[in-house]
Image (cartoon, helix red, strand yellow):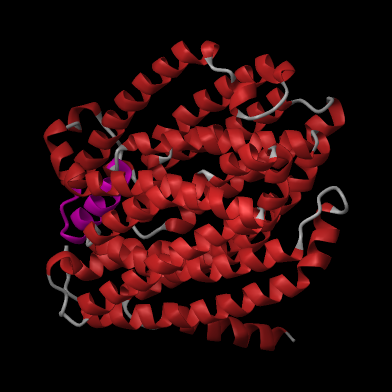
Amino acid sequence: MRSQISSLYLTVTKAINKGHKRSVKAKKNILASFVIKGGSIAISLILVPLTINYVNPTSYGIWLTLSSMVAWFGFFDIGFGHGLRNKFAESIAQGEYELAKKYVSTTYAILSIIIGAVLLIFLGINPFLNWASILNTSPELGDELRSVSLIVFTFFCLQFVLKLITTVLTANQEPAKASLFNFLGSLFSLIVIFVLTKTTEGNLIYLGAALSFTPVLVLISSSVWFYTHEYKKYAPSFSKIDFSLAKDLMSLGAKFFVIQIGALVLFSTNNVIITQLFGPEEVTPFNIAFKLFAIVTMGFGIVVTPMWSAFTDAYVREEYDWIKNTLAKMRKIWFLAILASIGILFASPFLYDIWVGDSVEVPFALSAAMCLYVVVAIWQTMHVFFLNGIGKIKLQLYMVTATALLNIPLAILLGKWFGLVGITMTSTLIFGVMGVVFSIQTHKLLNKTAKNIWNE
């Protein structure tokens, strides 16, 4: 038995260390990410019923809607995060480490200024916002929701700047280390929520504080560790802040900014639309189905995340054969993702039963719609990561802008016709169209037949 384990270990090690240096690094990060994110997925699945039981399905739906609305303010980075990701990777590929440090320092400075101003504005207007009306719930919850929103938004602003450490790690093709932060944040959140269930009655304020504070604590600790150890030469420094580099970051970042706003509409408005059409209690089954099938998208995300910066590195070095081979392998993984999604669909009634019991009912039709959405979204994501990595995103900018304008009215229309299934159908249609367009663009770029907007 011991010899068989040893033989298997050697085989796996040999497979991982085979190939281009860039591929080896990617495979090591993918393997580590599967372990880390597998733990994160398990924790998130445990956290859902624990949280629902701590409050109730309606309050949980309110929390999901509120947290997704606060996340909208993430677009205030104006694309600097994505700009840093590409510029940092380019600087490392060209051996310009001092320039990489300047990009890091400047991005920290700019985002701190931006989010500081946003927080001050929010502090001024929050007392006048009618959160009960915004979240379509009981007026008696107004004061509680105002306090929750203040807590969640304040900690979000801290995460806004602190999460740049994950951008730096990912840009250096080490996403496994970045994903470790999410795992630790989720783990600590689970521990805190479990303690709350044993020591307090259900309370949205406690829930919001617990789920908002723990990620910030992890990011602070991680930033201190990495910037005083292996990433010390890239650590942000006041003396290295160079606002003249903002133009370089924004030349690509501005396009990413518009794309982020579009993505914000595409990804983050469903909870609000559902709340307004059907009430906050319907947000819960929708998100239960989404979280179940998100196991597949998260698994695929583990594979593609290190590819963004790897594509940047390969494109700068003009290693096109490596890019083609990598995309071919990613398409094979997509087929496996389809099989996994179908398997989860047919097992979903059983999985829901052991996961959340009878506290939440999820229709099979909603699960089927979510399964199709996942398959389409993964196809689109695969090509988007390649295009983002090489900076050919002008067509994506136009497509995301156009579909973002269509998303809300189409979701409302299909939602009224087909309920929660209609909301999911909207996302599937939109990502399906974009997936086809971006796959065509990818083909043109790799075969050097891309012209005009296809090559911008």
Image spot of residue 117 (x, y percent) = 34, 20
Front residue (pair 288, 112):
288
Image spot of residue 85 (x, y percent) = 30, 51
Q: Which residues are magenta?
A: 80-97
Q: Seen in the image, is 6 located left or right of residue 98?
A: right
Q: Seen in the image, is 165 located left or right of residue 221?
A: left
Figure check: 79 above or below 304 = above
Q: Seen in the image, is 58 located left or right of residue 402?
A: right
Quadrant including the N terminus: bottom right
Image spot of residue 430 (x, y percent) = 44, 61
Figure check: 274 above or below 59 = below
In which image quadrant can residue 432 be found? bottom left
Front residue (pair 200, 2):
200
Front residue (pair 286, 333):
286
* Number of numbered discs: 0
Residue at figure coordinates x 79%, y 30% from the top left: 196
